[in-house]
Image (cartoon, rainbow, N blue to C red):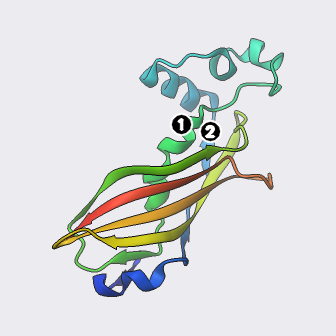
Amino acid sequence: MPELVAADKIKTLVGKENGVSEWILIDQDRINRFADATEDHQWIHVDIEKAKQGPFGGPIGHGFLTLSLIPVFSKSAKYLPEGLKMSVNYGLNKVRFINPVPVGSRVRSKMVISAVEEKGAGRLLMTVTHTIEIEGQEKPACIAEALGMMFF
């Protein structure tokens, strides 16, 4: 359960860790379902035999699959503003796919509150930097600055 922080104090958390999510398995079934949903059936993701001969030695998850897990990672936030009615995805500032995610890997996110801006009466724009790690690897899969518009 996240700690509730008074909305006028949330800016004091800029630069602080906002939680570490649980690990999520990136198996071939998840990759195939993502490929079907996005119509991105590139062989490095879905053709197991061909991918074994490719540059990564086997299939890898889509970068956008990794990125699409940000909402589930965010459920592990340590802090939430008190009085929050809802939060909506407001976009991304910067995304880098640094390391491929091999099929069978597990990923998680370490979250840091990067910025908080007032956006008018009853609204805050929060930027959270997600460093999405691959279990057992030093180099992260992805680093992304996600924006959430919060309504009070």
What residue is shown at x 47% (from left), y 81% (from top)? 13
Dot 1: element: helix
Quadrant of residue 16 within the rendered picture:
bottom right
Residue 82: x and y in percent read 28, 80
Disc 1 marks a residue whose amino acid type is Leu
The circle on residue 65 is 1
* Along the line of sight, the residue nearer the viewer: 13 or 133: 13
Asked if 104 appears above or below 84 in the picture, the reply is above
Dot 2: element: strand
Q: Report whether 77 appears left or right of 100.
A: left
Residue 113: x and y in percent read 49, 71
Contact, mark 1 vs mark 2 (Cβ under 8 Å) = yes
The circle on residue 26 is 2
* Along the line of sight, the residue nearer the viewer: 113 or 94: 94
Rate crowding at label 2 as few (under 14), some (14 to 19) or many (20 or more) other CA atoms within 10 Å: many
Residue 90: x and y in percent read 33, 52
Asked if 115 appears above or below 9 in the picture, the reply is above
Quadrant of residue 122 within the rendered picture:
bottom left
Q: CA distance from mark 1 to mark 2?
A: 9 Å
